Image: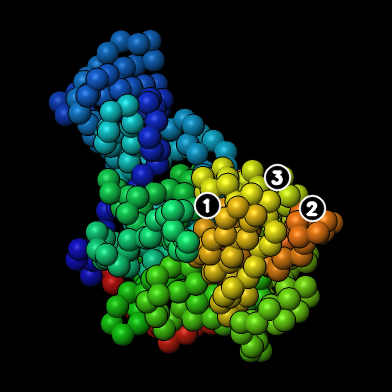
């Protein structure tokens, strides 16, 4: 994929695996030789074909796929109903969202429709930074996020369909279960519109600040050794960012090493004693923002529903935990005797943990899999310490998890970077803090 001197068109998966989709066209679109006027439409599966109808049920067209192209690309929009955001996370919900560009509807398997938006990368980015964080943030943070998001996307597109982007599935028949997510779930489009890739929640969230950040950084990316950086980011590192291999494969990534989210260095939290001391304290950090008015300014409204993320606590009663592990893994561990931390990354995030049950025992990793099996959705992070409570012999009544941060913690800490901007740091200072050794270049 050649991207120098040319802004790419990208394909974003908006809705996946549903039997029907309702939408409105807010402008004239073309479907082959058919002119589609503004109005409400519905598409559903009919055997091996998709059937498109207008609101009153009158049929318009049947085909294996439908490509709706705007007659006037700069002004024609479309609205989709029931777009899920935060899938499988605690903030999951469905929204009505408005988009620009082409709408492609396809059926990769019988009864399952995918809606894909083809759009210019820079227009996509203005929505991404406004969906990931509030566009009320300071412009230097929005610029840094734009460059980070653009770099990550172009890095992923450059490696599309290679083994480098594949994940590793969990196999709970094994004694040791090591799993992480990759791009292999997205064979029909470039990126999804949700947290698995980057949040892209349509045009409704974009404001003048987001558009300014996009224009001021147009075509700019982070590079390292001549390659566009895989510029990862997460919501809140908890005080120290994590290295790449804790969350994904064991490939070393020099610009994704661990760093303190503060002006002064912090030692790595590899031992249980160091992790406990750090997690049970509230150290000074860019992402340790206690002023709720600042948090409300920098986070989107639905993220503000998560009140505790720099430090948090949850209780897992024995029966609840046992049922949770069975539903998430398919394994009946029996009574859970211990959750034993085995290996931590520099930020204190667990990437190997031993689940010790009266019937079975398994080592589980990496960080996202640990977060997945210990929550109906996902734990905020895997940077936690475990305290059993109400012990009756060898079987505790439950376990308390004391945790730090929100997300995998690799790369840019979004709340920390926003905090840096609040303190007057520039876009370049923010990026050099989180991606050491990387530098900026302009592609187009």
Q: Position of residue 339 (x, y in %)?
A: 66, 63
Q: CA distance from mark 2 to mark 1?
A: 41 Å
Residue 99 position in % (x across, y down): 41, 40
Of callouts 1 and 3, the N-terminal one: 1
Q: Which residue corresponds to mark 1?
A: 131
**Please, what secondary structure does the residue beneath circle 1 have?**
helix
User: In which quarter of the view is residue 29 placed?
Assistant: top left
Instruction: State the mark number for residue 320.
Output: 3
Closest to the camera, between mark 1 and mark 3, is 3
Q: How many marks?
A: 3
The quadrant holding residue 13 is top left
Q: Nearer the viewer, mark 2 or mark 3?
A: 2
**Secondary structure under the numbered disc 2 in the rendered image:** loop
Visible in this render: residue 260? no
Kind of element beneath mark 3:
helix
Q: What is the CA distance from the residue labelled 1 to the residue labelled 3?
A: 34 Å
Q: Does residue 414 appear to the left or right of 311 in the view shown? A: left
Residue at (68, 78) in percent of width and height: 272
Horizontal and vertical percent for residue 268?
61, 85
Q: Is label 2 in contact with label 3 (beta carbons under 8 Å)?
A: no
Q: Viewer-nearest of labels 2 and 1?
A: 2
Sequence-first disc among 2 and 3: 3
- Give residue 15's position: percent from left, percent from top: 40, 38
Cα–Cα gap, marks 2 and 3: 10 Å
Q: Residue placed at 27% from the left, 33% from the top?
A: 109
- Residue 133 placement, left or right of 317: left
193 lies left or right of 375: left
- In the image, residue 444 sits, relative to residue 379, either above or below, namely below
Q: Quadrant of residue 158?
A: bottom left
Q: Residue furthest left?
A: 33
User: What residue is disc 2 on?
Assistant: 397
| Nearer the observer, 266 or 77 | 266
């Amino acid at each position: 994929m050649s991207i120098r001197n040319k802004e790419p068109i990208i394909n974003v998966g908006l809705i996946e695996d549903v039997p029907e989709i309702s939408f409105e066209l807010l402008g004239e679109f073309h479907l082959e030789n058919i002119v589609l006027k503004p109005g409400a439409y519905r598409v559903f599966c009919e055997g091996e074909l998709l059937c498109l109808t207008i609101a009153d049920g009158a049929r318009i067209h049947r085909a294996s796929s439908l490509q709706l192209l705007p007659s006037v690309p700069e002004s024609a929009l479309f609205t989709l109903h029931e777009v899920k955001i935060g899938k499988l996370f605690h903030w999951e919900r469905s929204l009505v969202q408005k988009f620009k560009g082409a709408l492609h509807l396809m059926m990769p398997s019988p009864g399952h429709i995918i809606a894909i938006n083809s759009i210019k990368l820079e227009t996509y980015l203005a929505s991404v930074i406004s969906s990931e964080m509030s566009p009320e943030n300071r412009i230097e943070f929005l610029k840094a996020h734009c460059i980070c998001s653009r770099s990550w996307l172009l890095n992923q597109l450059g490696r599309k369909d290679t083994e480098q982007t594949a994940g590793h599935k969990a196999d709970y028949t094994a004694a040791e279960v090591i799993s992480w997510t990759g791009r292999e779930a997205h064979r029909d489009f470039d990126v999804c519109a949700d947290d698995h890739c980057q949040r892209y929640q349509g045009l409704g969230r974009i404001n003048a600040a987001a558009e300014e950040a996009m224009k001021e950084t147009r075509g700019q990316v982070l590079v390292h050794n001549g390659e566009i950086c895989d510029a990862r980011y997460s919501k809140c590192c908890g005080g120290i960012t994590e290295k790449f291999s804790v969350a994904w494969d064991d490939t070393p990534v020099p610009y994704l090493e661990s760093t303190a989210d503060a002006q002064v260095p912090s030692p790595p939290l590899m031992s249980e004693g160091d992790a406990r001391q750090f997690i049970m304290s509230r150290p000074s950090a860019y992402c340790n923002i206690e002023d709720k008015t600042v948090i409300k300014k920098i986070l989107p409204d639905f993220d503000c529903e998560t009140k505790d993320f720099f430090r948090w606590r949850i209780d897992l009663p024995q029966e609840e935990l046992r049922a949770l592990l069975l539903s998430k893994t398919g394994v009946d561990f029996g009574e859970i005797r211990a959750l034993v931390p085995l290996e931590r990354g520099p930020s204190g995030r667990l990437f190997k943990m031993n689940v010790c049950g009266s019937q079975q025992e398994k080592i589980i990793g990496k960080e996202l899999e640990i977060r997945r099996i210990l929550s109906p959705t996902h734990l905020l992070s895997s940077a936690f310490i475990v305290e059993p409570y109400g012990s009756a012999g060898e079987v505790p009544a439950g376990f308390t998890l004391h945790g730090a941060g929100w997300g995998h913690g690799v790369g840019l800490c979004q709340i920390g970077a926003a905090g840096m901007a609040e303190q007057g740091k520039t876009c370049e200072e923010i990026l050099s803090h989180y991606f050491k050794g990387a530098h900026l270049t302009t592609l187009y």
